[in-house]
Image (cartoon, rainbow, N blue to C red):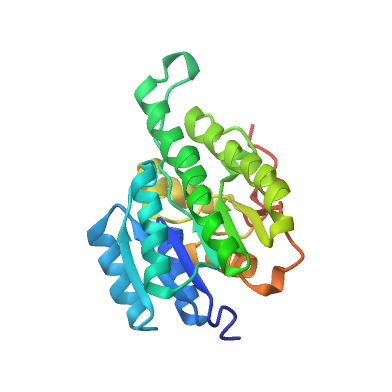
Amino acid sequence: MADRLKDKVALVTGGASGIGRATVLRFAGEGAKVMVADRNRLASDETLSMARGISPDVEAVPVDVSKWDQVQEMVDATVRRFGRLDVLVNAAGVLVLSPPLAEVDERDWDLVMTTNLKGLFLCCKAAIPAMIKSGGGSIVNISSMAGVQAYTRSLPYSVSKAGVIHLTLAAASQYTSKGIRINCIAPGTVDTPQARGSSQSSQALQDIAANHPMGRIGRPEDIADTILYLASDESSYISGSTIIADGGSRTVPPRI
C-alpha cells in the first residue's frame, strides 16, 4: 500500500537516527511532506539525503526540543515550507543509565526529564495551534516499555516515559474534540544507536534477542510501521491510546 499519507505534512523530532529516521523514510514513501528535526545536524543531513532518494518533499531543521524558541521556530519553519502541519511524531529522547534513586545525579535527572518530557510537551504546545489551523491532525508520542514497567537501570528515563503516557492521555482529553488525535507507542527493546549505547555491548542485545519470544529484538522499521498507522486516517477512531510494541516480550516470565 502506498500514499497512506498523501498530501499530509509531517514533522518528526529525533529524525536523525533510529526510530525517527525510519519514520521519516516510511512517511516519505507514503506520500507525506516531511520535516526532519534533530539537534544532530550531521546525522540529520544523512537522513535528509536518504529521504530525498524517495521524495523531493523533505527538509530538515535543527532543534533542541528543550528550548521553546527553537521548538516554535521548528513548527513555523515547517508551516512556511509546506503550508500546514498534519502530523507530529515526538521521537526525540535521551537515555542516561543511573544508579539507584538515592544516588542519581540531579544533572542527569534534569537532562532526561527536560528532553524526554518537557521537550515533548513543548513540541505539542507549538504544534497544536498549527494543527487546529490546518483542520486537525495526529500526534504520535514515543514512550517506552520502561514507562510501563520499572526500568531499574535508569530511574529518570523510566519516570520520564511514564510521564509521556499520561501526558498523551491528558492531552487527548483536551484536543480530540478539536480534531487532533493524540496517541502513544511504548516500544520494547529496539536496535537503535541509543539502545546499543545503553546496553554497552552488542552481546547484551544478542542475549535479549535470544530470550525474546520472537527470537529477535525490534527494528526501527517495526515501530515506524506502527507510527504510520497512528498517523494515517486508518486509525481515525483512535485517540488517547498507548500501543505496546514489544513483540510480546512482557509475556515472558522473568528468569530466576
Residue 235 is left or right of residue 44, and the answer is right
Residue 134: give x, y in percent of width and height.
57, 68
Q: In the rendered image, is residue 202 in sight?
A: no
Give coordinates of residue 9: x percent, y percent. Answer: 49, 72
Question: Extreme right residue here?
Answer: 237
Above/below status of 103 relative to 58: above
- In depth, the one of 56 and 72 nearer the eye is 72
**Can see residue 255?**
yes
Residue sitting at 60 percent across and 67 percent down?
231
Where the N terminus falls, by quadrant? bottom right
Which residue occupies 56% across, 78% down?
5
Mark count: 0
- Horizontal side of residue 48 vs 1, given as left or right: left
Q: Is residue 236 above or below residue 246?
A: below
Q: Residue furthest bottom?
A: 2
At 67% from the left and 59% from the top, the residue drawn is 181
Where residue 41 appears, as percent x and y from the top left, is 24, 58
Q: Quadrant of residue 80?
A: bottom left
Residue appearing at x 63%, y 69% in the figure:
229
Residue that sits furthest to the left in the current view: 42
From this view, report whether residue 211 is shown above or below residue 28.
above
Q: Position of residue 247 (x, y in %)?
A: 64, 57
Residue sitting farthest toward the top: 102
- Vertical placement of 36 versus 14: above or below? below
Identify the image quadrant of the C terminus.
top right
